[in-house]
Image (cartoon, rainbow, N blue to C red):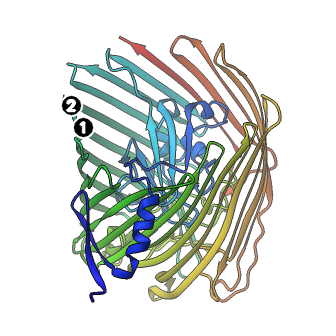
Amino acid sequence: MAKYILWTAPGRCFMIIRRSYIPILFLLLSCMNLSGQEFKPLYEWDIHEFKRMPYTYAGDLLSAIPGLRVRDAGLTGQWAPCRIRGSSENQALIFIDGLLFNDPWTGFADLNVIPVEIMDKIEYYPLMNPFGRHAPGGAVNIVTRKWNFNQPFTHVVYRSGSQSFSDLDVTYAQPFTSYLRMTAGVLLKKYGETLEDSQYKAQKTRLQLQLKPASEIEIDYRLYNYRSSADIPYDQFFPDDTVSVMSPHLDIKRIDQDFSLRWNRSLPFSIRITHNASVFRMRDNAFDAAFTYPGSQTNLQAQQQVSNKIPLRLFANWTKSALQPPDGPGTDQSIFTGGIHWQMHLPGLWTVNGQCYLIHPSNHDVKPSLGMELARSRSAFRFSIQWLHSVRPPSMMEQTGLAYYPFAPGTQNVFDQGTQTAARPGFYLADTAAPYSFHLRSLDRVTIPNWSLSAESFHTGQLSVFWQPVPAINLMSTGYLRSVQNTIHPEITDEGIQYRNTDSQTYYGLETVSRLRFFRNFDLSLSGIWSQTIDPEPVPEHPPWEGQIRLEWNYSLFQDDLDIVLMLRARGWSSFMIYHKFEDAVRKETLSSHALLDFKASFNIIDNVTVSYALENLLDSYYELVPGIALPGRRNRLSISWKLYN
């Protein structure tokens, strides 16, 4: 008698199962509600919550979600790029209305280009997401406000703040017919840091065409053109531990095109094609050298729901990248990711989400990725357990030897929640293919997250809880356990870059946020972060122990009738990081406590015009960007939003 049988189901899907598993399978199917539904985020914040939170830019809102780490470069909110990581320390992807926002080369997200005034809500998916992208660090989808397209309108947002920051965002929408709409916009921004000869200018234009020839067909085309020019100081450490502060000039040009087709028939189908071409040029006057890195990337993504009765969706994602370093051979890479997402609804408000990916980079064997989530959701309680086994193939910049990070480790940024290694703007550049090369490092801390020249394999387990027993009390907590195998970490020696293989690294942690609203106007928040690395020889970029205790209270005067918000916030936290056996030396470091006093005011002066002002003031001291150069611990931002219907 055969041990295995071929089992078919409606929707033309099939599987091979053991005969002994058939009774269990039918028992599960009898209990399941197989009605197809969209994946729901674990956390969801809307515009009404934004109004009650002091913020100067979108990163302040993301940092309030447990499990997300926003690592800014320079003063928070004033330096363009930042890196966002999940609780597992994997990079989290940022989506704008389902479109990937991260830079394809560096992975950074410039949250300054997203005015909070155009945001409607924030969705957070800890591990699995419905966008067909492999995001082991989780995904954040920023849903923008849906404007009334029945008539043309103009939306203007102007912002100005400390460190000579200012930007102007203009959006214009014009409906041509009932099925064709156009949206165009331009963003102009500039800022400078306190350091001498540090400035940044950028222009970003965008165009979107929406075509709906039939009720079930939606076509969307987007074009982005981005140009920036920057003089950025950074510190250079040589093998003999000498340091030099220089200021190179950077020019970046990038063009993105995105085409998507969605067919909302009985079985929805969608396809999306994205192509971007960029040129990264660096000129260093100190060495009288200039480099140009042209690159391109094409991404093809398709989704197909198998059946209305069986919530299975097929995903296919193909990415081809090419990067041409100076005076060296070019590098091409193709990565194919294919798999399925499924969702099952069990009795008792339980939901099971699953994913199965096959990742095939052109320079490595096929690697599987498996994930599972068990969630239970009620009006006041959400509970989720996630598990993921995955790999991370090397990126294009790692293959060419170029790793560009707009921050260098080694200095604690008092504005980035204490435990996040952020700090001064800089580079880590290791271009072994070019005749000219230099290496940047920090004497006390090296942060090169997930930097590996081999496929990185890891396991991640995560527990997330949201509980709101009464409207005045809510508790959010995320705990995680992560194990990494086969990583390679670079070390800089007199002979050049040497690589040290770490067979395994395991760490776990807990992050919790408790909020209590005593009265209508008064909120008290207590949060804690704790992480420990389990490894006989911890790697430099993740300290064996780190943690933070944070206390915050908000007092707000909120008047719904007049749309006026006056808010005063006091924050205090104490953070610690402890290192041991680092570069053959036992070393411990404890970070001091800090306090902030914030003020925010927002009001409508006339119809469709909103003015807001936010001020953050560090009470105790300043911090140093590089030794001997201090930055004041204060930042502010004025924002004016104006919407005009033509």
Determine crowd level at label 1: few under 14, some 14-19, many 20+ residues with C-alpha closer than 10 A.
Answer: some
The residue depicted at 27 percent of the width and 46 percent of the height is 256
Taking the view exactly as shown, the residue that stands out farthest to the left is 213
**What amino acid is found at the position of numbered circle 2 in the picture?**
Leu
Q: In which quadrant of the rendered view does residue 284 lie?
A: bottom left
Mark yes or no: residue 632 visible.
Answer: no
Q: Where is residue 65 shown, x and y percent of the image?
A: 61, 50
Left or right of 249? Residue 529 is right
Per the rendering, the mark at residue 211 is 2
Give 577 or 290, whichever is nearer the viewer.
577
Give 440 or 121, whichever is nearer the viewer.
121
Asked if residue 134 is positioned above or below residue 542 in the image, the reply reads: above
Q: Are marks 1 and 2 in contact (CB under 8 Å)?
A: yes
Q: In which quadrant of the rendered view does residue 625 lie?
A: bottom right
Residue under label 1, please give it: 220
Left or right of 544? Residue 216 is left
